[in-house]
Amino acid sequence: MRCDKCGFEGHKSEFRYLYNTTLDAETAYRECPKCYNWVVCNELEEERREKAAKA
């Protein structure tokens, strides 16, 4: 993931989970650990990226 405000990059787990827009939505809000900006995250896409990086 990457913060739009400060440019910090890290794994999804480094960004604090805030909430989903709806219960069945792929999109969630997470908080940047560096500048505390709210970042929109596509949870499913980030899962795929992390699994691909481990393979």
Image: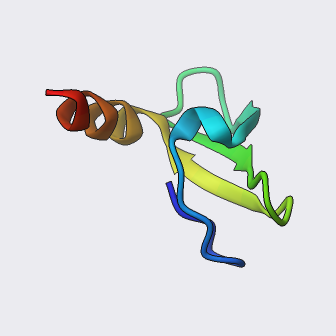
Q: Quadrant of the C terminus?
A: top left
Would residue 18 be found to the left or right of residue 12 on screen? right
Question: Residue 35 appears in which quarter of the rendering?
Answer: bottom right
Q: Residue furthest left?
A: 55
- Residue visible at 79% across and 61% down in the picture: 34
Would residue 46 be found to the left or right of residue 22 on screen? left
Number of on-image labels: 0
Question: Residue 12 appears in which quarter of the rendering?
Answer: top right
- Residue visible at 68% across and 43% down in the picture: 15
Q: Residue furthest top?
A: 23
Seen from the viewer's position, the closer of residues 29 and 34 is 34
Position in image of residue 23 (x %, y %): 63, 21
Position in image of residue 53 (x %, y %): 23, 38
Would residue 8 be found to the left or right of residue 16 on screen? left
Q: Is residue 42 above or below residue 9?
A: above
Seen from the viewer's position, the closer of residues 43 and 11 is 11
Q: Is residue 36 above or below residue 52?
A: below
Position in image of residue 54 (x %, y %): 23, 28
- Residue visible at 36% across and 30% down in the picture: 47
Question: Residue 37 appears in which quarter of the rendering?
Answer: bottom right
- The colour scheme is rainbow
Position in image of residue 49 (x %, y %): 28, 40
